[in-house]
Image (cartoon, rainbow, N blue to C red):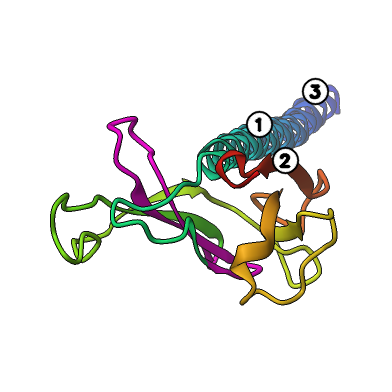
């Protein structure tokens, strides 16, 4: 009887130890899953914040450059009027962008989620100085402007908002608005950047 009792006790200990091992392994796996999930979450969050900051900085650089160049709108090398065309999502004009004394043909336009800058350098002395190849670059990405928030708004010499975009002679003031967000579905909310430019050479 005593031997049987001892064997039974040993068996009970072996069974309890196995149960402890299973529980310990399960707890370890759960802890590892929690750690990996936390690392993944923080990585994604940090990545989103970094990308959002990058999109904001890109939008700010784009606004700053557009405003700076628009202020310098001037007559072309063959005497054409400074303003070529106006629209809510695009603006074309002449301006000396590289300080060489000759006005380039400049085009800013919203294509998809990007603001595109197009530059045509003049062929001085040519009868058609702006027939060259346009060089394009992306000024800003992740732009979320819609019809309710146009990229460009135009004002005449009296400060009145212009609704007729064919009347380029009346333009004196441009407001640039860029709505930036890397992912509109996620927080933080859309960031709106706004600046303005008075056309110095048309005062």
Badge 1 crowding class, 10 Å Cα cut-off, few under 14, some 14 to 19, many 20 or more, is few
Q: Position of residue 202 (x, y in %)?
A: 60, 47
- Is residue 200 magenta-colored? no
**In the displayed structure, does residue 4 sit left or right of residue 150?**
right
The crowding category of the residue bearing disc 3, from other C-alpha atoms within 10 Å (few below 14, some 14 to 19, many at least 20), is few
- Residue wearing tag 3: 6
State the image coordinates of residue 86 (x, y, percent, origin top left): 58, 68
Q: Residue at x 78, y 46 (%)?
A: 192
Mark 2 or mark 3: which comes first in sequence? 3
> Residue 102: within the magenta?
yes
**Disc 3 or 1, which lies upstream in sequence?**
3
Q: Which mark is residue 46?
A: 1
Q: Quadrant of the N terminus?
A: top right
> In the image, what residue occupies the spot 16% across and 65% down?
127
Placement of 63 over or under 89, stated as above or below: above
The magenta span reads 85-112
Query: Which of 135/167 is in front?
Result: 167
- Residue 180 seen by the camera: no
Compute the Cα span from label 2 to label 3.
Answer: 88 Å
Mark 2 = which residue? 195
Of badges 2 and 3, the one in the foreground is 2
Q: Secondary structure at mark 3?
A: helix
Spatial CA span between label 1 and label 2: 29 Å
Between label 3 and label 1, give the one nearer the viewer: 1
């Amino acid at each position: 009887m005593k031997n049987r009792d001892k064997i039974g006790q040993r068996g009970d200990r072996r069974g309890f130890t196995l149960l402890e091992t299973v529980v310990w392994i399960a707890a370890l796996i759960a802890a590892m899953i929690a750690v990996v999930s936390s690392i993944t979450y923080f990585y994604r969050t940090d990545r989103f914040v970094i990308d959002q900051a990058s999109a904001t900085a890109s939008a700010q650089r784009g606004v700053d450059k557009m405003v700076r160049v628009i202020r310098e709108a001037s007559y072309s090398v063959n005497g054409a009027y400074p303003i070529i065309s106006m629209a809510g999502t695009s603006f074309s004009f002449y301006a000396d962008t590289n300080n060489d004394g000759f006005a380039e043909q400049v085009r800013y336009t919203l294509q998809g989620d990007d603001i595109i800058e197009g530059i045509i350098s003049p062929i001085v002395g040519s009868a058609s100085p702006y027939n060259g190849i346009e060089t394009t670059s992306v000024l800003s990405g992740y732009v979320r402007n819609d019809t309710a928030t146009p990229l460009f708004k135009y004002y005449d010499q009296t400060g009145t908002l212009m609704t007729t975009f064919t009347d380029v002679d009346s333009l004196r003031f441009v407001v640039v608005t860029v709505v930036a967000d890397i992912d509109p579905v996620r927080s933080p909310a859309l960031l709106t950047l706004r600046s303005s430019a008075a056309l110095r050479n048309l005062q």
